[in-house]
Image (spheres, helix red, strand yellow):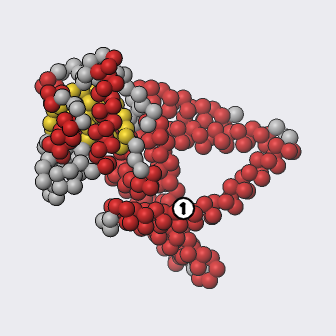
Amino acid sequence: MLLTYIAAFFILLFVVLYIIDKRRISNGIFLTLGIFFTILAVAYGLIATRNSILALIVIGVFFLIVLLVPFLIVGLGVGLVLNGRLMVKREGRRIPNLLTLFVGLAILGLIILFIFQITILNNIFLSIFFTGLLFIIGHFAFHLISFLLSSYLYQYNRPRLKQDFVIVLGSGLIGDKVPPLLASRLDRAIRFYYKQAAKNFAPQIIVSGGQGPNEWVSEASAMKDYLVEKGIPEEHILMEDLSVNTLQNMMFSKTIMADLKPKSRSIFVTNNFHLFRASLYARKAGLKSQGISSKTALYYLPNALLREFIAIIVMYKWWHIIIVSGIGLAVIGSIALTLYM
């Protein structure tokens, strides 16, 4: 019963906080804990029925999962390496595009080192190191699952067709041209614009983005030209051309909206992989805006989601530094104790 109460507590906590504000990283954490304890409660409940068939099924599933885990980890490493090669082929050999390749190689490298340790070296210090590393990986794996759950749930956000402003977040230009990734955001904003205009009134579109070092014009200027070419009236387009990151996109757009209409309703548009982190920045900037997303090519998603996850880890870096430092100190203490003994 205790497991059931714990599972219900975390699920209820998730539901309450999600209703209050979908833009919380803690939502995914509580949902992950709720799902974990629900699985434990169900498994324990099936075993506790004293039905030998159900107990055998639960134990069989458990051992099947344990046996599959190594293959899943190897498959993950190989899949990330292949995705990294595809990213390089289609997007160019830039460092951000190599992320899945590096992570995949790191996973495969650790697997080889672990096998070498348990079959040949059998070194006590390496065993302690791998134990600590396993705890660190488990910590980040838990937060990765929480992030993916939060991101997935947030995709189903459906703002009302009564928005005064639609903020389109910039994502970089090629010279003075809008690349496909940014075009998908603008196209999503256009669809929302016409959908709302047909039922209520036409919102104003704020194109948000400054000029980067390799860009000929500001992102806002290129985005405005794109919208005008697609038939959006120029008087319905507002430019925010000073921001250099997502937080500034939100802050500077908020200033524009406050000057024009203090009590306004707004949404923001970005790609699906970036939607949840953008919502965290909107909350940080004091905007009540929720987001809608445009689709991204499937091959691009693993790399993009990893980058988003790393960015969120950096947002809450001190929490993770404390956890990792604690594990590191425990490993050092264990090694020192082993040497002393």
- Residue lying furthest top: 200
Nearest to the observer: residue 213 or residue 203: 203
- In the depicted structure, whether residue 89 falls above or below residue 315: below
Rendering coords of residue 59 (x, y %): 77, 51
Q: Which residue is drawn at 41% across and 40% down?
A: 25
For residue 187, say whether it is visible: yes
Rendering coords of residue 273 (x, y %): 39, 46
For residue 128, say whether it is visible: no
Is residue 152 found left or right of 244 in the rendered image? right
Q: Looking at numbered disc 1 in the image, what kind of residue is underneath it?
A: Leu
Q: Name the residue under label 1.
A: 76
Nearest to the observer: residue 35 or residue 85: 85
Q: In which quarter of the image is the N terminus?
A: top right
Is residue 214 found left or right of 85 in the rendered image? left
Is residue 8 found left or right of 286 in the rendered image? right
Rendering coords of residue 295 (x, y %): 40, 43
Q: In which quarter of the image is the C terminus?
A: bottom right
Is residue 169 found left or right of 159 in the rendered image? left
- Residue lying furthest right: 52
Nearest to the observer: residue 46 or residue 220: 220
- In the depicted structure, whether residue 203 falls above or below residue 2: above
- In the depicted structure, whether residue 160 falls above or below residue 135: above
Rendering coords of residue 248 (x, y %): 20, 42
Q: Which residue is drawn at 18% across and 28% down?
A: 233
